[in-house]
Image: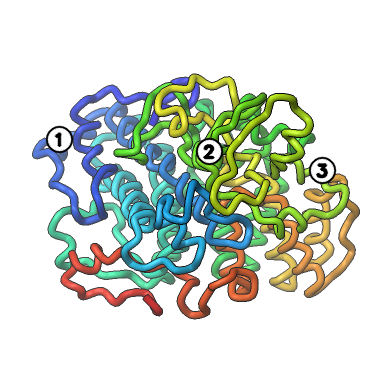
Amino acid sequence: MKMKHNIFSYTIAYFVLFMGMLSCSDNFVDVDSFDENSEDFFNSEEDYQSALTAAYDLLQSTYLNVMLGEIASDNTLAGGESATDVPGIQEVDDMQHTPVNAQLRDIWSWMFAGVNRANYIMEFKDKTDFPGKEGVLAEATFLRAYYYFELVKWFGDVPLAVDKRLQFGDQDIVERTPKAEVYAQIEQDLKFAAATLPVTQSEIGRVARGAAQALLGKVYLYQEKFTESATVLEELIKNGPYDLVTDYATIFENEHENNIESVFEVQYTDEEGAGFGCLQCSEGNVAVGFNGIRNYSGPVFESGFSFNVPTQEVVDAFEDGDSRKEVAILDIEAWAAQNNGVSYVEGYEHTGYYNRKYISRQGDLNTGDANLTNPNNYRAIRFADVLLMAAEALNRGNISDLRAQGYLNRVRSRAELADVTSTGANLTAAIYHERRVELVGEGHRFFDLVRTGKAAQEIEGFTTNKNELFPIPSIELELTGNRWTQNPGY
């Protein structure tokens, strides 16, 4: 990964070569053995830092997780050019996906590539000492936890590897690990990272203590460990160094990246080209081009592929006077009426709306393919999300509705909305609503609906006891000799 401001860069060609085998493999076990000299690596701090850069690199492929996290929900439709434009995305939108789905296979393989890269560092964690090595190991364990959390959210029970790589041949012996055990390892990794990482990092893009605390609080929340979640999130809220930015409209603009509200941010750049042959190789945010306005001509924005289009329902979910609405949702008809010379083509399932947070803006380098190399960072964990997660944990855990109201109303106050004074179940509903409108377009909605038991009533086509998880890619089952049991319903 090439982080903003050239913080990290590859310097060792052969390291890139054998690490590249992971990112472009079709699945987590179908990889060639590492170079015969790979065990002679990690002889210096530079080697560890290069390996850590490679582990960060797979974060950029999470653009697909974000996009499908919206499309699978009631927030957006697949869109695109036609009903056959990227069939795997259309299937997820319609809740008709099967184990033979290219995009779900990508998420599986790319997240396991991230796990393997983090584990490569941890496998050789004791080989060479240097000042600051604990920090490198803490970043690696955070990344492993992040990738495993994505895998558990999408697929449930997954193979768990700790401090060792999953390599060719392991398909004959590795089994799916119960998600409770995977969660336990994620918690352990994040506790270590939170205790070891500095409060702030001097290099933009490196994970700091608050990211580990926030993700740990989120992992607890997903398991309904409300007391543990509230404890770690409130510690983060009280001790900083994060806060809400004053103007919500600035959060998603490129010039305001890595601001005080960004607890964890995935870095993208437009300095290198990309192609459809290896989307995970792009250093740019691929989702931004996919979200863009089809054949657009006019000010501010660039053209795109018109996927991930917001529904009328989510537009209507905003309260009157909510200042976030126009920041989150671009009403293309209103925009065209306000600006002379605007033209565009209506794509499939056109609703008239676009995900304004993550559509391409004019002013970047337009490195080819321009639609795949957008420099817009992804705000993976914002402080507003931390506040709302803390509010939920306090409320649902019957700990303190008063404190829950306080955190919820900090978010609402910025949106110029009245305070919520309700308690109990009504407060829970208010928190859920606030998460939807505050975080729309950011990839959280589907998993929020699943973990709160509301997916079946909100998502058309959702089947209970099936669609809570996505299917294990069929190729993975075949590679294990069909020893693994497929997720229910598939």
Quarter of the figure with the C terminus: bottom left
The percent coordinates of residue 100 (x first, y second) are: 31, 63
Q: Which mark is residue 40?
A: 1
Residue denoted by label 2:
288
For label 3, the SS is: loop
- 3D distance between C-alphas at marks 2 and 3: 23 Å
Q: Is residue 33 above or below residue 336?
A: below
Quarter of the figure with the N terminus: top left
- 3D distance between C-alphas at marks 2 and 1: 40 Å
Residue 73: image quadrant is bottom right
Residue denoted by label 3:
323
Q: Which mark is residue 452?
A: none
Is residue 380 rendered to the left or right of residue 475? Answer: right
Is residue 98 rendered to the left or right of residue 170? Answer: right
Q: Is residue 470 above or below residue 66?
A: below
Identify the residue at image location x=24%, y=31%. 16
Is residue 109 rendered to the left or right of residue 240? Answer: left
Identify the residue at image location x=22%, y=66%. 174
- 3D distance between C-alphas at marks 1 and 3: 56 Å
- Closer to the camera in the image, 205 or 417: 417
Residue 479: image quadrant is bottom left
- Closer to the camera in the image, 17 or 324: 324
Q: Indicate the amino acid at tag 2.
A: Val
The percent coordinates of residue 354 (x first, y second) are: 64, 44
Q: Residue furthest left?
A: 36
Disc on the earlier residue, 2 or 1? 1
Q: Indicate the amino acid at tag 3.
A: Ser
Disc on the earlier residue, 2 or 3? 2
